[in-house]
Image (cartoon, rainbow, N blue to C red):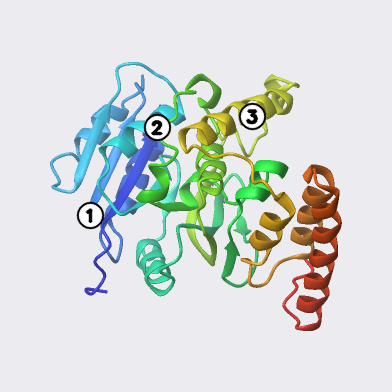
């Protein structure tokens, strides 16, 4: 692994997770291949998190950012990104844990696939619930997903601690100013943002992250819906605002011939699922304004579908 020359940054976001924080930082430090830098962003915790973080700041590769005001998870992502110098950024929630071989395996993955911009991996649940969560049993090239995300809101990724993204991709959407919208569940910004700015995404099937399930785990416990029954409706409008911001920041406009662009994007997935075909068919049918390109796109899409079906490249799941 000494030939790997990719500089890596681990960004740990924390708010009042003192009881878990030591394990998270320790897991980042004790990788079989070391992170070049570990940046811990504390979002104005009121427990003894600062005391724990200060125990690590004497290490050369550990930096700490202590925010004076609690502003939420997106703010921590913004601060961590602005301080990071790595070529690839790895995100870790302070209640989760990396397996010791996580970074080593991720770097092997990136080195073997130079076109890879964004990786998420399978993970193990532990704590109140245990089990392995895998999207698939094999590694996957998921291609590009700009159109699929913009027109269908596709969420292609996983929980924060499984995500790693090339810096050149992240800088196209972070920092994001909509702090109040994403005080929690800011991994949405990473997953959607990367897709919208043209990241080529991959899935790593090895479960190399441990996702802690506990009473304060809002995502797993569906706390959002229990507190606010209109949460998903409000999240839709937050998503629209986020998309508009990222599109404006990158001077992105809708393609002139949507059907043509949709087909090209579909073809970037080496082994698409039947679900992918349905999504692109829906996009062309609903959003292509030109009747000529609508018909031509649908015909071409079906032709390509049957071709990959005959070639055995279509995944049925």
Quarter of the rendering containing residue 241: top right
In this rendering, the answer to whether 5 lies above or below 233 is below
Q: Which residue is mark 3?
A: 240
Asked whether residue 68 is in view, the answer is yes
Quarter of the rendering containing residue 219: top right
In the rendered structure, which disc, 2 or 1, sits on the residue that comes first in sequence? 1
Q: Secondary structure at mark 1?
A: loop
Q: Which residue is mark 2?
A: 175
> Local crowd at mark 1 within 10 Å, few (<14), some, or many (≥20)?
some
Residue name at image x 85 percent, y 64 percent: 299
Q: Which residue is mark 1?
A: 36
Question: Pointer 3 and pointer 2: residues touching (CB < 8 Å)?
Answer: no
In this rendering, the answer to whether 7 lies above or below 180 is below
Q: Nearer the viewer, residue 245 or 313?
A: 245
Q: Nearer the viewer, residue 313 or 205?
A: 313
Question: Pointer 2 and pointer 1: residues touching (CB < 8 Å)?
Answer: no
């Amino acid at each position: 692994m000494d030939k790997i020359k990719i500089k890596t940054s681990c960004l740990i976001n924390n708010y009042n997770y003192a009881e878990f924080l030591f394990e998270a930082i320790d897991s980042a430090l004790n990788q079989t291949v070391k992170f070049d830098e570990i940046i811990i962003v504390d979002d104005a915790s009121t427990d003894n998190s600062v005391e724990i973080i200060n125990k690590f700041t004497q290490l050369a590769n550990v930096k700490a950012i202590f925010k004076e005001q609690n502003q939420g998870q997106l703010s921590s992502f913004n601060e961590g990104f602005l301080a990071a110098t790595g070529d690839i950024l790895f995100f870790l929630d302070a209640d989760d844990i990396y397996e010791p071989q996580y970074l080593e395996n991720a770097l092997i993955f990136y080195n073997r696939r130079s076109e890879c911009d964004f990786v998420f991996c399978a993970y193990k649940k532990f704590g109140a619930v245990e089990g392995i969560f895998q999207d698939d049993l094999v590694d996957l090239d998921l291609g590009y997903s700009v159109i699929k995300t913009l027109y269908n809101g596709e969420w292609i990724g996983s929980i924060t601690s499984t995500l790693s993204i090339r810096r050149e991709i992240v800088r196209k959407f972070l920092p994001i100013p909509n702090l109040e919208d994403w005080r929690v569940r800011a991994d949405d910004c990473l997953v959607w943002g990367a897709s919208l700015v043209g990241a080529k995404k991959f899935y790593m099937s090895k479960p190399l992250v441990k996702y802690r399930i506990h009473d304060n785990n809002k995502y797993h416990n569906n706390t959002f819906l229990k507190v606010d029954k209109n949460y998903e409706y409000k999240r839709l409008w937050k998503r629209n605002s986020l998309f508009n911001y990222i599109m404006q920041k990158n001077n992105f406009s809708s393609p002139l011939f949507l059907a043509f662009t949709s087909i090209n994007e579909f073809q970037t997935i080496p082994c698409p699922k039947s679900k992918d075909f349905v999504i692109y068919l829906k996009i062309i049918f609903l959003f292509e304004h030109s009747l000529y390109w609508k018909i031509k796109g649908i015909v071409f899409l079906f032709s390509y579908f049957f071709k990959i079906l005959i070639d055995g490249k279509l995944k049925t799941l």
